[in-house]
């Protein structure tokens, strides 16, 4: 049986994203990747890719602080297909002004990468981000979510380009979000990759805070850190603790020519089938929970 799919985790590798990493067309081509002609062209490429695989909607992530405009343009031209996410470094002096501008342009989710940018989730600047997200809800304004990458962090494009990745995963404990999740219950919080190695902590947080959602994206290679753990066990435990309404499917797709990473979808569906998850619950995970969050 086929399941309708919305994808909550797609990185938008625009020309300005590559430029921000110091990579030009020749460099990217040597990697075997496509260098997009423009943000518009990349948006159209993703629409065609979603059509090819039967994916209804996708969250596009601006994957560098400062690259929100590229995703905002793609969303503006395809509002029925894309939801815009953008990375924010809250320690930057202009962080809140930048976030306000991105939200004004129609983006819907603020992405925090504390291990990448070297700050604690207890930092008052992070509380300012949540205060902004909470203040944007009401009237005709769609609610703003906060995506917080916790656990192990590895950025494949940086490795391929030989760029240093001085990430400090001590800053990536999901439990550090507990106070903010309690204080701002109207703000949906998304923890990607089941906590990326901090599954226990992510489950503890989500169990006590009903505004916390877990994104299922990527190969979930962090499973190797827990001997005997399988994707089937991960899904069963998450469903037992969090329930079916706060698990959101994602692939962590990013570059072309690979495009949409259907292998991730197939592996996750096979895991859910293997543990006997019903079609109705799979619809929630693969489609309906995303649609409810980003109506």
Image (cartoon, grey):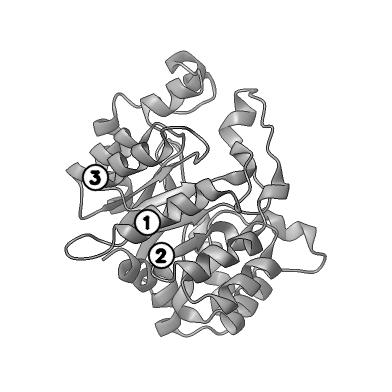
Closest to the observer: 72 or 56?
72
Badge 1 or badge 2: first in the primary sequence: 1
Residue at the spot 58% in from the left edge and 58% down from the top edge: 193
Name the residue beneath numbered marker 2.
187
Q: Position of residue 22 (x, y in %)?
A: 50, 18
Q: Is residue 134 left or right of residue 214?
A: left
3 or 2: tag closer to the N-terminus: 3
Judging from the image, what secondary structure is the residue with disc 3 in?
helix
Q: Which residue is mark 3?
A: 104
Which mark, by number, is residue 133? 1
Question: Is residue 246 found left or right of 116 in the rendered image?
Answer: left
Q: Residue at horizontal 67%, vertical 53%? A: 151
SS for callout 1: helix
Q: Is residue 235 above or below residue 95?
A: below
The crowding category of the residue bearing disc 2, from other C-alpha atoms within 10 Å (few below 14, some 14 to 19, many at least 20), is: many
Left or right, 153 with reference to 51: right
Tell me whether circle 1 and circle 2 mark residues in contact (CB < 8 Å).
yes
- Using the image as rendered, state which of residue 281 and residue 240 is in the foreground: 240
């Amino acid at each position: 049986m086929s399941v309708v799919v919305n994808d909550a985790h797609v990185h938008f590798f625009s020309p300005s994203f590559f430029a921000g990493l110091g990579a030009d067309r020749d460099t990217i081509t040597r990697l075997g990747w496509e260098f997009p002609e423009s943000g518009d062209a990349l948006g159209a490429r993703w629409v065609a890719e979603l059509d090819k695989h039967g994916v209804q909607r996708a969250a596009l992530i601006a994957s560098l602080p400062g690259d929100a405009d590229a995703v905002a343009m793609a969303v503006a031209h395809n509002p029925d297909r894309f939801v815009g996410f953008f990375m924010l470094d809250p320690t930057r002096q202009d962080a809140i002004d930048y976030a306000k501008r991105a939200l004004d342009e129609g983006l819907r989710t603020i992405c925090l990468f504390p291990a990448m940018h070297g700050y604690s989730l207890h930092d008052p600047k992070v509380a300012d981000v949540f205060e902004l997200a909470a203040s944007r809800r009401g009237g005709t304004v769609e609610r703003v979510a906060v995506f917080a990458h916790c656990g192990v962090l590895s950025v494949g494009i940086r490795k391929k380009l030989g760029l240093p990745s001085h990430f400090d995963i001590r800053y990536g404990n999901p439990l550090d979000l507990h106070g903010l999740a309690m204080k701002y219950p109207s703000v949906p919080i998304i923890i990607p990759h089941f906590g990326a190695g901090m599954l226990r902590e992510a489950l503890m947080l989500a169990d006590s805070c009903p505004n916390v959602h877990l994104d299922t994206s990527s190969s979930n290679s962090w499973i190797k850190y827990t001997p005997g753990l399988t994707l089937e066990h991960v899904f069963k435990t998450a469903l037992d603790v969090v329930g079916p309404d706060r698990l959101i499917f994602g692939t962590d797709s990013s570059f072309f020519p690979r495009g949409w990473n259907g292998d991730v979808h197939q592996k996750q569906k096979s895991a859910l089938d293997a543990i006997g998850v019903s079609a109705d619950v799979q619809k929630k995970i693969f489609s309906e929970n995303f649609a409810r969050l980003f109506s």
